[in-house]
Image (tube, coloured by chain):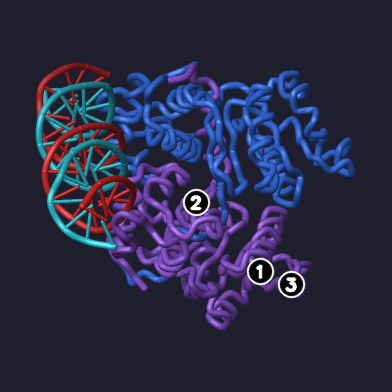
Chain colours: A blue, B purple, C cyan, D red
Amino acid sequence: LAWKGISDAVIRRLPVYLRVLEEVKGKESCISSHELGKRAGVRPALVRKDLAWFGEFGKQGVGYDVEFLQDELRKILNLDEPLHMALVGVGSLGHALARYNWRRFQIDPLFTIKLVALFDVNPGLVGGYVDDIPIYSVSEIPRIVPEEDIRLAIITVPADAAQETCKALVEAGVKAILNFAPVTLDVPKDVQVANADLSLELQRLAYYIGAEQL
Amino acid sequence: LAWKGISDAVIRRLPVYLRVLEEVKGKESCISSHELGKRAGVRPALVRKDLAWFGEFGKQGVGYDVEFLQDELRKILNLDEPLHMALVGVGSLGHALARYNWRRFQIDPLFTIKLVALFDVNPGLVGGYVDDIPIYSVSEIPRIVPEEDIRLAIITVPADAAQETCKALVEAGVKAILNFAPVTLDVPKDVQVANADLSLELQRLAYYIGAEQL
DNA sequence: TAGATTGTTAATCGATTAACAATC
DNA sequence: TAGATTGTTAATCGATTAACAATC
């Protein structure tokens, strides 16, 4: 499903709400915007405004039904059915992330993002597996991505290979990319990139180690 | 050094400017806010406004001296001298990040964030090394952190150990934390946390794979 | 019913953009 | 000097917060 024109600031908070609902489920059947906000680190008014973009999920005087809201949020985020993902670049970081995500998918029944294919240029790796997941040659991207209905990808290749990797993925049909390479990727407007740039984050944090407190 | 009350939105852009300056250095000795902005993905007026918070670094009619601006930004971000970092949790992700950061420090002379200590609970790992970096027991945090003047830390422990790890680090003197555990850490106001929460990012991206284009 | 909490509107706050005088 | 570009002020834009009528 598709909701247009909703700010990314709103979208970023939805997975946090989802996490809170998962914690609360079983303990409480209903939750108020006050309680949900407190646990998510968001003001109650903002919780209500965020949810109101997508529909009327609450009951006045009562709050939100935990399981119902969880279902609705999962639908909104396309997490109500399995979503296939690829990872390109099986170096030490890629290898670690592959195991991390695979475990998560195995353990948590609500985590529907399934890593189904790994890609690398190294012929020594191609044909092998990480846990259950096969490693293909990057030249196989145009074939495997449509075949496996892969919509989401993680890039963990070196900086100088990131843009071409990105291009191949997008041409094969990938719609969203989590990029660990320290490069700003150039993508069409209908493709979403999230940058997980370790060194930018560390450099930002460095600013605060000197601050004498605001 | 410390500048108070400057928005985090501004601080986040400074490392991006720093990266652009590094790319341009050698090719050009001067850069305009227009060119710097174009490469950083930011409007020129915003580049000028961001820099103006910290001083007058440019020359009218000319632009900014690349090397001078780079030096100034590095001073502002506390990246003008080595900054010691620790990593807690030497699982597969921690191991990969340790290698990643260590390599970066070795290769790039301007990358001053040095990983000097690893910590884990596993007695089988304690006493060992990843590349050059020693692995200590987490019980050693109170001794090693002050001894090595560690100000910055990466947390890659399981979710249920993250808060206590965080507490130990903060009590030992750590001022900024990059947290990979899927937990909201509770810290004093003078400690800065950056969350690198893989599953929240993937869940956010999932929203966009369904969108029909805005 | 009385108390609680929603969804929504209006007010506030903060960040970005546009415009321009100052000046290299 | 003439052209270019800064630093800064005012205008705009967008996101958050406060308030409250509607209603469970």
> Which badge, 2 or 1, comes first in the chain's sequence?
1
Q: Position of residue C24 (x, y in %)?
A: 29, 62
Circles 1 and 3: CB atoms closer than 8 Å = no
Q: Nearer the viewer, residue A70 or B150?
A: B150
Q: Chain of mark 3?
A: B
Q: Secondary structure at mark 2?
A: strand
Q: Amino acid at mark 2?
A: Asn
Please report the residue visible at 55 percent of the width from the left and 24 percent of the height from the top: B209
Q: Chain of mark 1?
A: B
Q: Nearer the viewer, mark 1 or mark 3?
A: 3
Residue linked to disc 1: B118
Please report the residue visible at 76 percent of the width from the left and 44 percent of the height from the top: A90
Residue B132's tag is 3
Q: CA distance from mark 3 to mark 2?
A: 27 Å
Q: Is residue A149 left or right of residue B1?
A: right
Residue linked to disc 2: B195
Please report the residue visible at 29 percent of the width from the left and 60 percent of the height from the top: B53
Q: Position of residue B210 (x, y in %)?
A: 53, 20
Q: Nearer the viewer, mark 3 or mark 2?
A: 3
Q: Amino acid at mark 1?
A: Leu
Q: Amino acid at mark 3?
A: Asp
Q: Chain of mark 2?
A: B
Q: Quadrant of residue C5?
A: top left
Q: Secondary structure at mark 1?
A: strand
> Which badge, 1 or 3, comes first in the chain's sequence?
1
User: Which quadrant, please, contains the C terminus of chain A?
Assistant: bottom left
Q: Is residue A96 left or right of residue B169?
A: right
Circles 2 and 1: CB atoms closer than 8 Å = no
Q: Position of residue D10 (x, y in %)?
A: 11, 43
Q: Mark 2: few, some, or many residues within 10 Å (few <14, many ≥20)?
A: some
